[in-house]
Amino acid sequence: MIAGFLTCEANMLKRRYKLVQKVPKTPKSAYNHGRFISSLIEHQIKHFHEVEKSLAKPGEPVTDISKIKTELEASKYLQKMTARLHPQGGEKPKRIAKPTKARAATKRKPKAKKKQGKQKRK
Amino acid sequence: MQIVARDDETFRRVGHYLLRTRQVLKRVGGDMSAGLDKLKHIVVLMMENRSFDHMLGALKKTDPRINGLTGNETNPDTNGNPVKVQPNAKFQGQLDHDPDHHFPGVDLQIFGTTDQGPGRVANMQGFIKSYATQNTSIEQSRGIMAYFAPEKLPVLTRLATEYATFNGWFSSIPGPTICNRAFAHYGTSFGNVDMNLFYVQDPIVSIYERMIQGGHTAKIYYYDQQSSTMEIVNLLKNQPQIFGSYSQFIADCEGDTLPEYCFIEPGYNDHPGPGGGQILASDQHPDHNVQEGERFIANTYNAIRTKQELWETTAMLIVYDEHGGTYDHVVPPNCDPNFPDGHSAPGDKTGTGAAFNFDRLGVRVPAILISPYIPRGTVIPGTEDPNGVIYEHSCIPGTVTNFFLKNYDNRTAREKNSKNFLMPLTDTLRPDDDCWVFDL
C-alpha cells in the first residue's frame, strides 16, 4: 500500500485541520501480483530490455523477457534494471515522513500552548 | 455564449463563471497574480488511462459549468442499439479486458468508423465498437460507457470542486501512453504515435534538463524500483541524477528540499512490499484498482498541503496521460496549424493506413490544478465556450519553461504556443481553515 505518510497521524490531522475528509481503504482483495501484464507494462519491459542490451558487454547474456508474464515477474525485472541504472532509488530517504520521536516532541509544544496557537492563526 | 439563468443559484453560478472567465482570460494575456508571484514549486502528477467523463463527467449535475454528462449520451453497440452512459463504473473488474487505446482504436472511437475516406466527421460514436474488438462480450463492451458517481471518487471529486477543473484538457495524441507522456516531458513525441521507445532529436531536451541547465532544480519521482519510470528509460540511463523515488518525494516535502519542478509517476504494478507487505498499483490503469489511485493522489496532495510554507508556494497539477479507451463526449479539437509540432507519422506507423500530421488532439482527460490561491469551484472553460482555452500535455513543459526560464527557444512551435495552466492562480490566499486535508 501507499507509504503510510498520514495514516498514523489521523488524530493529529483532525486536531490541526478544520476540513478533513476520510478516504476509504482499498480492499486487500484488489492485490494480484499474478495478474498478466498489460500492453503498457509489456512495453515498459521492452524499453528496459533495449537499455539492458545496450549495456551488455560482448557475449554477456541478457534477460529473456519473453518469459515475463505477470506483474510480479515484471516488477522483479524492473527492480533489477532500475537498481542498476539508479541505485540511489533503493535507498531509504534521509527523512521519513512519519512522526519520529524528535518530531513528536516538537509537535507536543504547540499542543501545550493550544490557545496561543489558535489565536496566532486567527 | 448564451446562458439563461433559471433561478438565483444558477444566476450566482453564471455570474461567478463569467467573472472567473474574465480573470482567466486576463491572465492568458500575461498578467501576474500574487499567487504566481509567490509560486516556487510546480508539481505534476500524471495518472493513467481514464477520460474526463469517466472520472468527472457526473459533476455536471451539481455544477452545470462542468462540461460533463447529461446522462443522455449514447454510443451504438455492435448490434446498432444505442447504449446510454451509466453511473455504474467499478473500481476494478469492469475493464479487465484492457480497452484499446492504440492509434487505430482511438481513431475508431472518435470517428465511429474505420473508414479513412474524406468527409468523415468526428462524432465520438465508436467507443463500444472499439471495446468489442478486445474479446469482450456484447454486455462487457457496453461497460465502456460507465462513469463514476462523484461519491465513489471522494478524492478526485473533492479536489475538482475545491480547486480548478479544466473542461478542455486533451491528451496530445489520439493514441497510447508512451507518445502522450513524451509530450509532458519534451513537448513533442518526435513523430511517435505508438508505444515504442522514442529517441530524442536535437535540439530538444527534456524539461528537467532545461531546468537544470538554466540553474534551476527539477526531478522525476518514480514510485519505487519495482515500478520504475515508464516512458523515459533513456533519460534514466543517461541522466539518473534527475530521478528520485516517491519516498524521496515525501522526504523532500518534509525536508523543504522539493525541487522547483517535479513530475510524479504512480505505481504501475502490484508487487510485494518491504517486510512482506503488498504494494498495489496506484496508476488507475485498467484493471488496477481506482481506489488505490485515489489514495495515492490524496497522499501526494497531503504531503504538500500539510507543510504550510510549501502549500502556499506550490501549484500541483493532477492530469491523466490519455483516456485509455473510456468514453468521453467531447470531440477533440484540431491543433492550431500556425504552430505545428513539426512531425508526421506515416500510415504504416499509425496503423490506420493514413498519415497523421499531429494536427488533432486526443481524447479529453481529467485535469485539476491545486493551489490555495485558486478560488473554490473554479472551472476553466474548454471547447463548449467560444472563449474557452484548450490545453494538452505540451502545456506542461511549456508552462514550466515560461515560468522558470522565461525565454527559451529550443522547442516546438506547438509547445511555445501552448497555454499557461497556472492562470487560475489569483491574488487571494485562501485561509488555512478553508482547504481540506485527507485522512488516509
Image: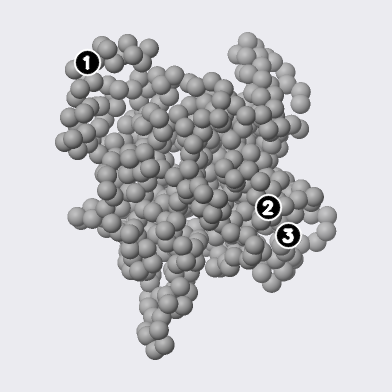
Q: Earlier in the sequence, mark 2 or mark 3?
A: 3
Quadrant for the N terminus of chain B, please: top right
**Dots 3 and 1: beta carbons under 8 Å?**
no
Real-space Cα separation, disc 2 to disc 3, in angstroms: 15 Å
The image shows residue B354 at horizontal and vertical percentages of 74, 66
Which residue lies most toward the right here? B119
Quadrant for the C terminus of chain B, please: top left
- Chain of the residue displaying label 3: B
Q: In the picture provided, is A100 more to the left or to the right than B29?
A: left
Q: Residue at x 76, y 23 (%)?
A: B2
Q: Are marks 2 and 3 on the same chain?
A: yes
Q: Residue at x 53, y 35 (%)?
A: B369
The residue indicated by pointer 1 is A113
For residue B342, the mark is 3
The image shows residue B406 at horizontal and vertical percentages of 63, 43
The residue indicated by pointer 2 is B409
Q: In the picture provided, is B218 more to the left or to the right than B51?
A: left
Res A45 → quadrant: bottom left
Which residue lies most toward the bottom here? A59
Badge 2 crowding class, 10 Å Cα cut-off, few under 14, some 14 to 19, many 20 or more, is few
